[in-house]
Each structure stands twice: as structure tokens, then as C-alpha cells.
Amino acid sequence: MADKDTISFDVQSSTGDVQRLELPDNINLSLMEVLKASEYPIPATCGGMALCATCHVEILKGVENLSTPSDTELDMIDTLPNAAANSRLACQIRLDHRLDDAVILLKG
Amino acid sequence: MIIQTDIAIVGAGPVGLFAVFEAGLLKMRCHLIDALPQIGGQLSEIYPKKPIYDIPGFPEVQAQTLVDNLRKQIEPFKPTFTLGERVDSLTRNDDGSFILTTTDGTAVHSKVVVIAAGLGSFEPRKPEVADLGRFEGRGVTYMVKDPELFRDKNIIIAGGGDSALDWTIHLANIAKSVTLVHRNESFRGAPDSAEKVSTLAKNGKINLLLSANLKALHGNGVIKAVEIEDKQKQLLKIDTDYLIPLFGLTPKLGPIADWRLNLDKNAIEVNTFDYATNVSGIFAIGDINTYPGKLKLILCGFHEAALMAQSAFHFVYPDQKASFKYTTVNGVNAF
């Protein structure tokens, strides 16, 4: 996949709608910033510091490809009522090819 | 009792606080209302110790220090505060003035309303369990305002963060029984508190259910029992007088959405001349507003507060002309 110059993955909203996002691989953004730019209703109150959890997502497919979450991120996820085993904060995930073909459920 | 003021400011974050200063220079008094129990908005609630680098004149300032400095800066203008209460309704009098009422029944009468509510009011994160809303205020509560309420009662606390641990420890000595329900097998934060909680559990002072989840609520009008799925996936039905879910806070726009203001994606549309909304006498400044080119920066909110005050003056003093004066020339004339 790494020879492609686009990254694509599926985003599932809380209502169940699934949308395929395809993005150039040279934009230096977090998944949270990409989701916001794609008009998903993510407040991102803290702006990407892993402090508000409004960008909480569950990686339904492909979590094993992503970087391991930091302690700060795990601490925050631990406080959430609806956290799942594959919960992540989108602000802590960089947009790169590790996201290819992932399925991301919005939970924030 | 109705609180009388010139400008009612919804939101006591940095922009709401600085609006007091700009209003004060024009001899307008302000009352601030915030759902959080302290001023400072998200700076104090979410990232008090984080450095901010884009406040003009401060190469680096800790978020809480900025809030403390703003409080000091506005002191001469004697702002008053209603904290820990969320604004609920807004009504308009025949003379054009406003009455804001909070969820706790506090009423504020003002000539101008300034919404500086950031991303909305911070409200408790709620667990996904059926009938939760039906028992709110009937045994389900999301904060401990008065620990004495729980004296000799059976309570269930849900959550794994600092506040769930701290209140479990505190209420263990007050309540008849405390059950702490946490989704994970261990607590990540606050090792001291986690240690205390596990000691309390070992000594039989509390009932600690790890890897457990709330499944159902039972009661007739008020809550009577909570069904919890334990580690072995078995359902336990635990009798209780209170369920206290403590999962932190998250911002919600709340009732502001019903005030007939023009909204665009949860932000209030304003005119960049003076940050007025479509409703005469109501302004919106800071992260809550939107306009072409909007940047959600504290410094932009400060600018918006200054321009808002010039127009607000005409509502507070309809017969006078606002005369713009520099603080370097006139100083700050306290109330």
C-alpha cells in the first residue's frame, strides 16, 4: 500500500452511516483534524492534547497497525463511560498509511 | 431575588473575563454565569498547567496563570459571578432588556447579553444505559455537591477517573454502603487514590467491582437497584439509593441552541462589525461564534470583546455617545 499517494479508510458515524475517506498522504494532520475538516461533528475542545476525549473513536478494523497509545491517551480513555478495547483518541493518531483500510467508528 | 447588571456574560472563560475589562472601561457593569464551579473555562477545567504561547506580550504563560491575571485585571470593575449553574432560559422584557435564568433558578436582569460560552457548557459524560434520563434527579446524580446527602445511604459510584476514586474514598465514611463500578481491571491515574480504594475494598469498607459494567436501572419513580455485569459476565442486581456516574465533563451547546440565534454547525453567526448576533442586544464572542475567517484563538476573542463593548454601550446608555479613551491616557477608573 505504501506506494500509493493517498490514504483511504472508512468512517462510521454514530448513526451507522459509513463514508470512505481518501486523502493525500503528504498532509501533516492528525486523524482528529482530518475528521473535523471532513465536517464530522467533533468539538475537539482541547485542540489535540488528549485532554477532552471529544474525538474518541473506536478502531473497528486495523487497530494493530497503529502506533501504541501514550499513557496520557490511555489515562483519558480510561475515564470514558463508553470506551471499548480498541478505543483511541483521534487527535493522537497521525494521518499516514498505517490507517489504510481501517474502519473508524466515531464515539465522541 | 433578581441580579441586576448592565451586561450578562454567559461563560467565564478568558474571553468572558476580558469582556468585563472592556465593558468596565465604558462604565458598564457585568455579571458572569458559568456552569463550572470555577472561572477560567476550559483553561482551568481541562488544561490549567499547559503553557500557551500565542498571548501577545507573554512568550509563554500557563493557562491557569492567564486566568489568574485576567481575574486581577478585571477586579477594578467589580464583576459578580454565578458559578456552578448552567444558563437555562432567556426571556425578553417589553423594554428590550433580558432575563437569564439558570437551572438552579437564579435570575439575571440585564440590558445586554454576551455569549462567551466557548464550545458550550461543560456537562457530565453519561454512561450508555437505558432509562438513565428517567432517574436523573431521582437517585441518579452526576456530581457530589453536598456529601451529607449520602449519609447512611446505599450508593453506587461508576467510573475510574480521579473524581470516582476521590469520592469513593470520601463517601466510604459517610454512606451506609459504597459500591464502585469500573469498566477496567485496574485504575490508571492517581496511584495513591487507587491504593486507598483497594485497601478499602480489602477491608470490606467498600464493594469494588472491576471489569464490570452498568447494564440496567430499576425503580419505581426513584432508583431502587442497578444491574451490573461483573467480570464473569454474570448479572448482579444491587439495591441502592443513589447511582453516581462520574465520567468527567464534556462541552454541550445546550439551551443556547434554542434562543433563535442563527447557528452554523453549533457556532453562533455574528457580524464582524461588533460581533452582534441576529438578535438585537445579544452578542457572541470567542470560540462560540463564527464568521468568515474565524480563528478560535484567545487573542481573537479579546479583540472581539473590545469591539462588542463599543456597541453594547448603546444599549446600556442609549442617550450617550461612547468616547473611546486609551488606558495609557486615562488609566483604569475603578467602580
Image (spheres, coloured by chain):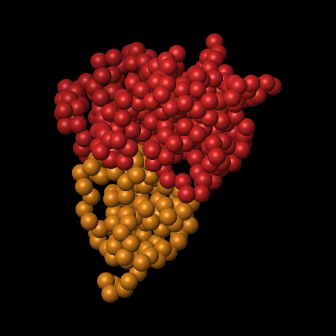
Chain colours: A orange, B red
Q: Name the side, left or right, on which B263 lies relative to B172.
A: right
Depth order, front residue of B306/B290: B306
Residue B11 percent location from the top left of the image: 52, 33
Residue visible at 25% across and 55% down in the picture: A70
Residue lying farthest to the right in this orientation: B94
Q: Is residue A27 above or below residue B43?
A: below
Q: Quadrant of residue B210?
A: top left
Quarter residue B199 falls in: top left
User: Does the rendering let one see residue B32?
Assistant: no
Instruction: Decide: is A18 above or below B123.
Output: below
Q: How many marks?
A: 0
Q: Residue at x 54, y 25 (%)?
A: B24
Q: Looking at this rendering, what residue extends furthest in the bottom direction?
A: A3
**Viewer-proximal residue, B211 or B106?**
B106
Q: Is residue B121 positioned above or below B184 on the image?
A: above
Q: Position of residue B17 (x, y in %)?
A: 48, 31
In this rendering, the answer to whether A88 lies above or below B322 is below
Left or right, residue B205 beside residue B325: left
Percent x, y for residue A93?
34, 63
| x 48%, y 50%: residue | B296
* Quarter of the N terminus of chain B within the rendering: top right
Q: Position of residue A4 (x, y in %)?
A: 37, 85
Please indicate, yes or no, whether residue B307 appears anywhere in the rendered image. yes
Q: Residue furthest top?
A: B1
Q: Nearer the viewer, residue A64 or B131?
A: A64
- Residue plotted at (45% across, 44% down): B299
Q: Nearer the viewer, residue A73 or B25?
A: B25
